[in-house]
Image: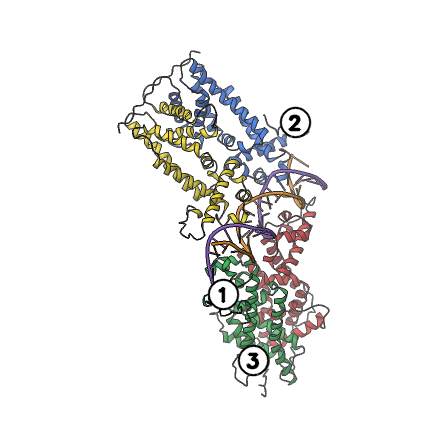
Chain colours: A blue, B yellow, C red, D green, E purple, F orange
DNA sequence: GATGAATGAGGGTTCATTCAT
DNA sequence: GATGAATGAACCCTCATTCAT
C-alpha cells in the first residue's frame, strides 16, 4: 500500500510473478525480523525462506533497509485504515471502542506490531520520522477521546497525553505474554483491560484507604 | 558465575586494573547495546570505547554473549536488591510504594531497563531462563500486593497476574518517552501514574455513562 | 557429495566459470597444503593465489575443511581408478605391476600423496573414516597379490597385511627424497625398488651368514 | 641435552622448580604436537596442560619455535646416543642389530619419532639444517652397514643410499599402525621385519617365476 | 618464576550488495 | 525475474608474544 517496493508498476509486461515474489519476501522478512531482530537477520536467510537466491531480492527491494521500511510503513498505514473502518455499535463509549479495537488488532498482527516497536531504532532517520508521525496520529486518536471525554465530564484525566501513553503501553504489552489456548480467551482479555482502563480514567474520588498494618 | 568481574577480588596484588577494565567494558557495552541493539554492536566498537584492542576484551568476558548476560543478570539482581532495600514510610500503601519505586528506579537506570526488555531474545536459552525467572520474581512482588490488597478489600482486581502485567507495562513505558527538563518533573510523572494505577485497581462502581452521541 | 565442483554440470549457461574457479582453488590449496601444512595455510593465502577475495572461496567450498576433504577424497578415488585402468603387459608379475604402478603414480602426484599422508589427522572424523576406507581398499590390492602369490608358492610371506604395509611404506617414502634430474632416473628407481620388494617376499632360504667379526 | 632451553644454567638460586616446569612444558608440547601438529597447537593449550599461564612459558622457552626445535634436537641426539649405547650380542649381524634397535626405539618413542618426521617443515631453516644433519648421520649408520656387508659379499645392494631410505621408511612406518595388545607382539614385528629386510638385501638369484595366468 | 593484562596481527567466516548472463 | 559468482568490508574470536607487578 504505502509500500516503497510497490514501484510505479508501469504496466510492465509481467508484474504478476514479481508481485507475488515481493509478497513472499515481505512475509518471510516479517517473520524473521520479529523472531530474531532486523540486525540479526541476513538477506540470505530471507532469500532461503523465499526459495530464491539472495541477489533476486534486489529485484524487489533496493536494500534490506527498504524491506524494513516497507513493513513498518505498511503496518502503520493499515492500522490507521483499520481504525477508520472499524465497525462498532454507534453508542459504544469511545474509550471502549479504542480499547477493543487496539487489543483485537494487536493480537491479530502480533509480528507487525512487535517489529514496529522493536525495530524503530533500526530505521534510517527519514523513515523513522515518517513512522513516528503515523504513530503520533494513532496516539492522537486516544488523546482526542480522553480530552473530549474529560471535557464532557465522563472521564477524569489530568494529562491526556500521558494517559494516552500509559493506556497504549498497557494494551500493547498484551501480545508479549498472551498465548492462545490459555486460560483466558481474547474476549476475557478485552474485558479485563477494558475494566482497568475505564477505572483508570474514571471520574470521582477513589480514595484508597491506607493499609491497617 | 555472575561474571569475571564478580570474583572475590582476593588476589589483591594485581586484579584492580582488570576489575576496572571489566567495569569500563560493561559501561561501554551498556550504552552501545541500549543505543543500537546487541546484534548491531561490534566488539570493535566496545573496545574502541574502552580504549583497548578488541582482543583485550576477551581477558574479561569470554564472549560477546557473556557481556550481555552479565549486564542483564546484574540488572535483575540489582533491581530486586533495590526493592528489598527501598526505604518508604511504613504506612505507605504497598501499591504506591511499588509504583514510586518502579518509576524512580526505571528512570534512573533507563539503559539497563531498556536492554533488559529489548535484548531478551538475544540471550541464549540458559541465560534467558535465568533472567526470566528473575523477572517473574519481580512481577510476583506486585502480584502479591494486588492479591493481598484484594483479599483485604482495599483493591478490586479480577486477575492479579494480568493486572500486574498491565501496570508494569504501563510504568515501564515511561522512560521511552520521558525526557528530563520537560514540562513534567519526575515527581509529576509519579503522581500521574500513581493516580492511574490506583484508580485502575480501586474497588467500587465505576459506571461510565455512555456518551450522549 | 564429493564436492561442489563435482556437480552434474547440467546448468550449462553459467557454471563454467564457477567450475574453473573451484578448480583453481583446489590447485592452489593443494600446493599450499603440501608446502606448509593444512593448519598453517590461510584462506586468504589461497584466495590470493586464485586471484579472488577470500569471501569468494565460500561460493565453491563451504569451509576450509571441505577443501581438504575434497582433495583427499579425490586423490584416493583417482588412485584407485588409475589402478583399475593401469595398462601393463598381461604376463607381468602382479607384484611388479603394483610396484611400478605405485612408484609412477606417486612420483607424478607428489603433492596429493603427501597431503594424503600428512593431513589425515586434520580431517574431521567422518571424512577421516571415508579416506581410511579407501586407503584400506588400496592396501587390500597388494595384500591380495601377496596372498595369492604365496598360495601359489611364488612368494613367501608370513604376514601379508604386515608385508603390505612394509612395502607400501617403503615405496611411498620415495617422493620425499627423490628429485628429478638427479643421478637416478625414475626408471632406475623403479628397478631398484622392484628388486628390493621382490627379494623381500621371495621364497627360498636366504640364510645370511653371520659376520666374521 | 642438546637443548636450547637448557640455558647456561648459571647456578641460579633456584633452578630446580624451573627445570621441572620446563620438563613439563616439553612433555605437554610433545603430546600436543604429536596429536594435532605444531601449527594447530597454541601456547595457551600447552600452558593449560602444564597448569600455568601462557606468559610463564616464556620463562623457559623464548618462542614456540624453540620448543619444537628443543624437542627435535633432543630426539635426534638421544636416538644417536641410544644407538651408541645399544647392547647386542657381539656376533649379531649388523643389519639385524640395526633393525631390532630401530624398531624398539621407534615403538617406545612414538611421539618423538612422529613429530620428527611430521614437523620438519615447521622448523626454521637453521634448525632444520641441524636436524637434517643428525638424520643423515643416523641414515649413514645403516648405509655403512650395507656398504660394508656388500663389500664382504654378505649382502647384495645396488644402491646403499637408496636401500637405506627404503629400509628406514619401511621400519619407520610401523608405529603408525602398530597397536600394543594386538595379535602381534613387538617381538613378532621385529622378526617379520627382520625377515623382510634381510631378504631384501640378501645376495643370490631371486628369480621370481612369472604367474601362470 | 609466575600472573594478569595488554598488543597487533591475523584466523575462518558472513555480510549486503552488484552484475553479467 | 532469477542465477551464480564476485566484491570489499566487517564479523567474533584466537594467536604468539610482551611486560609491569
Residue B125 spot, x, y in % from top left: 45, 43
Which of label 2 and label 1 is nearer to you? 1
Q: Is residue A62 above or below residue C171?
A: above
Question: Which sits in the foreground, C21 or B211?
Answer: B211
Question: Mark 2 highlights which residue?
Answer: A9
Label 1 in the same subunit as label 3: yes
Chain hosting mark 3 = D
Residue C206, x across and y down, in percent = 59, 82
Residue in the foreground of this view, choosing between C60 and B51: B51
The reply to whether the C-beta atoms of the residues labelled 2 and 3 are less than 8 Å apart is: no
| Residue lying at the far top of the rendered structure | B212
Residue D96's disc is: 3
* Residue D210 showing in the rendered view: no
- Nearest the eye: C187 or A140: A140
Where's the C terminus of chain B, which quadrant?
top left
Dot label at residue D22: 1
> Dot 1, how many residues are within 10 Å of its Cα: few (below 14), some (14-19), or many (20+)?
many
Q: Position of residue D190 (x, y in %)?
A: 53, 76
Q: Is residue B21 left or right of residue C25?
A: left
Amino acid at each position: 500500500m504505502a509500500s516503497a517496493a510497490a514501484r510505479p508498476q508501469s504496466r510492465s509486461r509481467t508484474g504478476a510473478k514479481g508481485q507475488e515474489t515481493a509478497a513472499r519476501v515481505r512475509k518471510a522478512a516479517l517473520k524473521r525480523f520479529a523472531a530474531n531482530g532486523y540486525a540479526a537477520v541476513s538477506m540470505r536467510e530471507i532469500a532461503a525462506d523465499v526459495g530464491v537466491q539472495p541477489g533476486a531480492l534486489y529485484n524487489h527491494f533496493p536494500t534490506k533497509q527498504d524491506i524494513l521500511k516497507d513493513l513498518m510503513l505498511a503496518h502503520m498505514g493499515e492500522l490507521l485504515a483499520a481504525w477508520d473502518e472499524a465497525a462498532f455499535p454507534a453508542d459504544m463509549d469511545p474509550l471502549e471502542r479504542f480499547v477493543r479495537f487496539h487489543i483485537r488488532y494487536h493480537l491479530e498482527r502480533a509480528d507487525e506490531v512487535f517489529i514496529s516497536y522493536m525495530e524503530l531504532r533500526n530505521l534510517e532517520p527519514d523513515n523513522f520520522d515518517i513512522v513516528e508521525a503515523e504513530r503520533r496520529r494513532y496516539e492522537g486518536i486516544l488523546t482526542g477521546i480522553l480530552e473530549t471525554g474529560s471535557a464532557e465530564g465522563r472521564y477524569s484525566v489530568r494529562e491526556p497525553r500521558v494517559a494516552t501513553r500509559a493506556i497504549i503501553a498497557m494494551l500493547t504489552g498484551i501480545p508479549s505474554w498472551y498465548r492462545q489456548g490459555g486460560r483466558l480467551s481474547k474476549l476475557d482479555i478485552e474485558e479485563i483491560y477494558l475494566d482497568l482502563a475505564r477505572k483508570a480514567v474514571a471520574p470521582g474520588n477513589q480514595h484508597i484507604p491506607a493499609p491497617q498494618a
